[in-house]
Amino acid sequence: MTTKNKDLQFLRVNHLRGPNIWTYRPVIEVWVDIGALEEYPSNLIPGFTERLVAALPGLLQHRCGVGEVGGFHQRLIEGTWAAHILEHVVLELQNLAGMRTGFGQTRSTSQTGVYKMAFRTRQEQVGRAALTLARNFLMAMINDTAFDLAAGITELKDIVDDYCLGPSTAHIVEAATERRIPSIRLTEGNLVQLGHGSAQRRIWTAETDRTSAIAESIASDKDLTKTLLQACGVPVPEGSLVRSAEEAWEEAQDIGLPVVVKPYDGNHGRGVSLNLMTEADVVAAYHLAARKGDSKSVIVERFVTGNEHRVLVVGKHVVAAAKGEALWVTGDGTSNIIELVDSQINTDPRRGTTEDAPLNALAPQHGAEIILELERQGMTAYSVPLAGQKVLIQPNGNVAFDVTDEVHPEVARAATLAARIVGLDIAGVDLVAEDISKPLEEQRGAIIEVNASPGLLAHLKPASGKARPIGTAIINHLFAEHETGRIPLIGVAGSKGTSLIARLIASILTMSGKYTGVACEHGLFLDQRQVEKNNCATWRAGQNLLMNRTVQAAVFEANAEMILTDGLAYDKCLIGVVTDMSGLEKLADYYVSEPEHMFKVMRTQVDVVLPQGAAVLNAGDAQVAELAELCDGSVIFYGMDEALPAISTHRAAGGRVVVLRNNEIVLIEGESEHGSIALTSLKPVKAEQPESVMAAVAASWAMDISLDFISAGLRTFDSNRKRATF
């Protein structure tokens, strides 16, 4: 048997950015035509399974539908088809590239050889690149041809680095996800919104929307920072601001040697020279600091004996602390400093050039601080030390050794006080001490800097010691224990009167005192004013509502086609309304041709209802009524006839229903009636569409809005509200 010239063709590749028919998370959906490979499952391609798992041994850990480790390998041996294999390969490639994923599904369609496959991806460009790589690799395995998989994975890693959140930001977002706080990435960088609408917060790695610009300016002004700290009793080293090399040496003599020279406005340790004893060293250090800072001003201060430490303060608490160490190399009589650093320091697997590495790789020929330190020892990067000769490469730095559990309470108090004095909600407080388990005053220790936007990686991936839950601390700082970052979200799905229902609900919410946004086919509305006339029952318009800080509640319209092409605009909602399952004839191009297919599409709206929320379902549509058993929250049925089976059964179980009786909309819970609204009291446009009004009433009732507000919202609703002007 030969499979030469057999191929996998992608008929369609679509990024579903919100909850969809596959899962709650964004996925890439692929329509795959495997062509002649339909006749060749994996067990009929000689040597294929062996080649595949040899090249990608991680596939042996995939569970697949069997539900246990090795399940996918079992499927390969028994025989499975190329589209399903592609699903697992693309997931494994993303994992190898450093972007963890796990979900995937593959389903056949009504057309022989054509499959719909979906796989989880955290970033669209990475997912698409992984898909292309997976297809090319899989065909090479099928046809037993050479393929440079290592080069492909390296390229994929580069795309991950370019497009995905940095590890620190990703850690914070993961902590938010653990608390069920939603997130939206606002840029291609690390600016992320946590929560929705008026309940949102924003982060930019270790900066938050509580991080004051004034505080950042103070932190970057080292002399001002030291003055403020000293005034409040925080121990700091003596020193002064200088503007020339001559002044630097004069100040060093006044303070007393040894001294430290550093930029007036520097950060992250750039341009800092330590333990300077001679005029030549001080002059050279001054010029280095002047180059590294944004101004020519330089600080000269007393050298504090001890090790450098970085204490991370979040809010009012110390959440992590790390210690630095001096770096030395030992000569062998033949290797120069560069070679010795590469063989004795850079071989440490914890060192690297990317953000993922807890320690930096060193380049003695390029690092200005290292060059200066070597000059002080009469060497350059190209000097060859004698055998056994020890050479200091960095006197301090490499602050990546966890000592959080050793921090003395008085040291923690000083660090948190320093952060508060500067005004930072998240701060990296640099201090020097012989022993961080003792108060600073006992050892002439001192706080030397307070930094805004501190690096987090040393605490997340320390060179030694325990990783600290920094993300959790930051999320707990931004959100109180009872806060979820969520505002009331209401989704209305279907094709019958959904725009009217969405706007009626918004009118009622506005009447109850909430600034409400609506994204529907009639446009985009804010506080009952139309700000966009185009069809806004779209993912993008929905996202715009969620990003709006003024919005206290939001209503979204969705139909089957939107769910199939984009997914819902939100991850979860408080209320999910489903009106009907009609329109099947318009979805043939999506391989949705049977009633059960439509059921799977429309259940998406019910699947995202929060446990404390409710599904509002049309009891007059038997298929819609069946969605009730899928809801994690409660259920309210509405219907024109209170004798409908779904309504009768639900009432008998004590459930809530909204029905039409004698031209009145009646709210009933079990055997108890909670009031009614006469259709004759409403405007004709609403009275003529009682089902839509009942859906809006039921949704509002589910949010515990009083009947008075519901009635007022219905009566004052104006379907012809003019477009807002700004």
Image: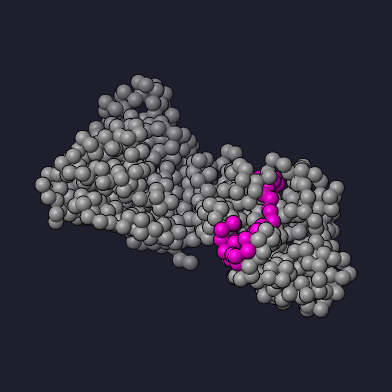
Give the answer, above or below, for where 453 lies relative to 604: below
Give the answer, above or below, for where 279 lies relative to 71: below
490 or 152, nearer to the observer? 152
User: Percent position (x, y) of residue 36?
Assistant: 12, 49
Q: Residue at x 21, y 44 (%)?
A: 47
Which of the 4 image quadrants contains residue 145? bottom left
43 or 600, nearer to the observer? 43
Answer whether residue 556 is magenta in the image.
Answer: no
Q: Is residue 125 left or right of residue 366?
A: left
Q: Is residue 162 left or right of residue 199?
A: left
Tell me the magenta residue range. Answer: 316-345
Answer whether residue 333 is magenta in the image.
Answer: yes
Q: Residue at x 42, y 23 (%)?
A: 672
Q: Residue at x 26, y 46 (%)?
A: 51
User: Percent position (x, y) of residue 605?
Assistant: 34, 41
57 or 539, nearer to the observer? 57
